[in-house]
Image (cartoon, rainbow, N blue to C red):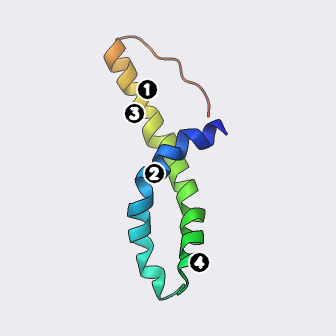
Amino acid sequence: MQLAGEISYGIYILQLPLQRYTYFLREVLPSPTQRDVLLAVVIIPVCYVVFRWFEMPARLYLRRLLTGRPVATRPI
């Protein structure tokens, strides 16, 4: 549940760009429900990757930069 909370911001931010990117699927998947399900299946792993490989390192870097001391990392 904590991980879901951590990546929820990425889901919020990335849903519109991913939805527009997958818009071309309207000819392959004519049903809006099918497109929404596919988007949900794609967006969660994408948001985890963005969180793990971009957001966490950026957060740690900014904390070190602003505080001037090392910041302990925690595994996710």
| The quadrant where residue 73 appears | top right
Instruction: State which tag comes first along the sequence, 4 or 2.
Output: 2
User: Local crowd at mark 3 within 10 Å, few (<14), some, or many (≥20)?
Assistant: few
Q: Name the residue tied to disc 2.
A: 12
Asked if the residue under mark 4 is in contact with the one under mark 1, i.e. CB atoms within 8 Å, the reply is no
Q: Amino acid at mark 2?
A: Tyr
**Tag on residue 60?**
1
The image position of residue 15, as x and y in percent, is 45, 59
Q: Residue at x 67, y 40 (%)?
A: 1
Q: Amino acid at mark 3?
A: Ala
Q: Nearer the viewer, mark 1 or mark 4?
A: 4
Secondary structure under tag 2 reads helix
The image position of residue 70, as x and y in percent, is 44, 14
Q: Name the residue tied to disc 4.
A: 34
Instruction: State which tag comes first along the sequence, 1 or 4.
Output: 4
C-alpha distance separating marks 2 and 1: 21 Å
Q: Amino acid at mark 1?
A: Leu
Instruction: State which tag comes first along the sequence, 2 or 1.
Output: 2
Q: Name the residue tied to disc 3.
A: 58
